[in-house]
Image (cartoon, grey):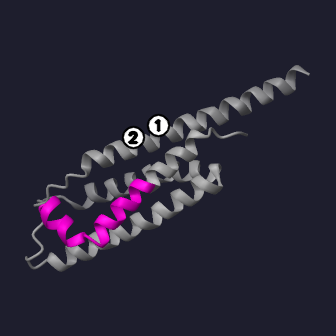
Amino acid sequence: MAIPRYISFVAFTLGTYDMVRGVAHTIFAGYAATHLAGVDLKGPAGRDLLVLMVAFGASNLVTACALIYLALTDRAGSLVLLILIPIAYLAAHIGLQMHEIGLTGQGVFPGQFNMTVYLTICVVSATSGLLSVWRQMRSAVHFGRSR
């Protein structure tokens, strides 16, 4: 089963992007929260918001390292991670929908468009990679039957 090479390229590229996001959400968390997301950190929940943002940034750094490592060493692992990332964000979306009833937000979150593109790239790449593997397996079965 040969997974297409572009899967590694996509994983490496997204890993690099996640590294930038991780740095922005950890090292530059205060700036990103106040100047980019428009979140008020001076309010009573300011430190809590910052802790959540830094934790998110740390998970970005872990995802970045995993994507880059797998892109360089294991194409199948890259494909698995490209499948798991949208599933994880879907779980987060479901959790948010379940618990945000009656809550209002103050943030702008300018990265939402970038995340939509990121997740679309994951879904399209993973789907096309899986279809490629499926086609290869199917043709191998048909080839075996024709003998």
Q: Residue placed at 46% from the left, 55% from the top?
A: 15
For the record, the magenta segment spans: 16-38
Could you tell me which quadrant the C terminus lies in?
A: top right
Identify the residue at horizontal 66%, vertical 36% (top origin). Answer: 133
Where residue 126 sits in the image (x, y, percent)?
Answer: 52, 41
Report which quarter residue 47 is drawn in.
Answer: bottom left
Q: Is residue 22 left or right of residue 43?
A: right
Query: Is 142 situated above or below 126?
Result: above
Left or right: 72 as drawn, with respect to 142 = left
Residue 48's disc number: none
Does the stretch in magenta take in 24? yes
Are the residues tagged 2 and 1 within 8 Å (C-beta)?
A: yes
**Residue 84: percent from left, percent from top:** 50, 53
Q: Amino acid at mark 1?
A: Val
Say which residue label 1 marks. 124
In the depicted view, which residue is nearer to us: 110 or 140?
Answer: 110
Q: Residues within 10 Å of mark 2 (few under 14, many from 20)?
A: few
Q: Main secondary structure of the magenta part?
A: helix
* Relative side of 34 to 82, left or right: left
The image quarter in which residue 60 lies = bottom left
From the top left corner, tell me how far across and down residue 93 is, in percent: 32, 54
Judging by the rendered image, the residue that carries numbered circle 2 is 120
User: Label 2 sits on what residue type?
Assistant: Thr
Q: Tag 1: Cα neighbours inside 10 Å, few (<14), some, or many (≥20)? A: few
